[in-house]
Image (cartoon, rainbow, N blue to C red):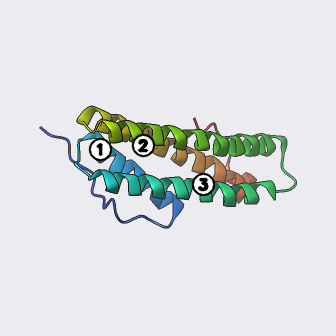
Amino acid sequence: MPFPKANVDIHAVPTDFDELIDWLERWSYNLVLLEEYPLPEVKSALDAVDRAVRAHRTEADRRLRSLHDLSDESSRGRKVVLNDHEWFETSLEQFWWFYRVVEKEDHGGHRQALGQYGRVLGESLRRHRVDENALLKGPSAGPAHRAR
């Protein structure tokens, strides 16, 4: 019995960052299931993810650094979230590395590895957003936890 593929249009890039994370996870899942996306479409999707993550970092770093009167716990949480943003730069480099492997030798195993990495990146981004939103909403939102 085959696994059902996610319903996703790889061309329909969401403008909302949280929706983009969901979109990334869905098309990455489809790569794992050997969806035959043309390579230029995969590259375009990776470009969109790369731009969105970098834009998110710029905007979120500005907002997080402007927070004042943080408790010790919130201050530590902010440091974790800001460090996550640095880690995501490395994650994007790794995502592109997997893409270049597929570009050089396009076969199912390499596409599955690219898709698995996309799923891991998506899950990391999703967890990160929980921590980040808690900080931006204030102490009533609850404690931050590690994104990775």
* SS at badge 1: helix
Residues under labels 3 and 2: Cα distance?
16 Å
Residue holding disc 2: 118
> Residue 37 appears at what percent x and percent y?
26, 52
Between disc 3 and disc 1, whose residue precedes? 1
In contact (CB < 8 Å): disc 2 and disc 1 = yes
Residue holding disc 3: 54
Residues under labels 2 and 1: Cα distance?
9 Å
Quadrant containing the N terminus in the rendered view: top left
Q: Amino acid at mark 2?
A: Gly
Q: Amino acid at mark 1?
A: Leu
Q: Residues within 10 Å of mark 3 (few under 14, many from 20)?
A: some
Q: From the image, state whether disc 3 or disc 2 is nearer to you.
A: 3
Residue holding disc 1: 31
Residue 142 visible in this rendered orientation of the protein: yes
Between disc 3 and disc 2, whose residue precedes? 3
Residue 104 or residue 11, whichever sits in front: 104
> Residue 100 appears at what percent x and percent y?
40, 40
Apparent side of residue 98 relative to residue 141 in the rendered image (left or right): left
Q: Residues within 10 Å of mark 2 (few under 14, many from 20)?
A: many
Residue 82 appears in which quarter of the rendering? top right
Apparent side of residue 142 relative to residue 93 in the rendered image (left or right): right
> Residue 27 appears at what percent x and percent y?
34, 51
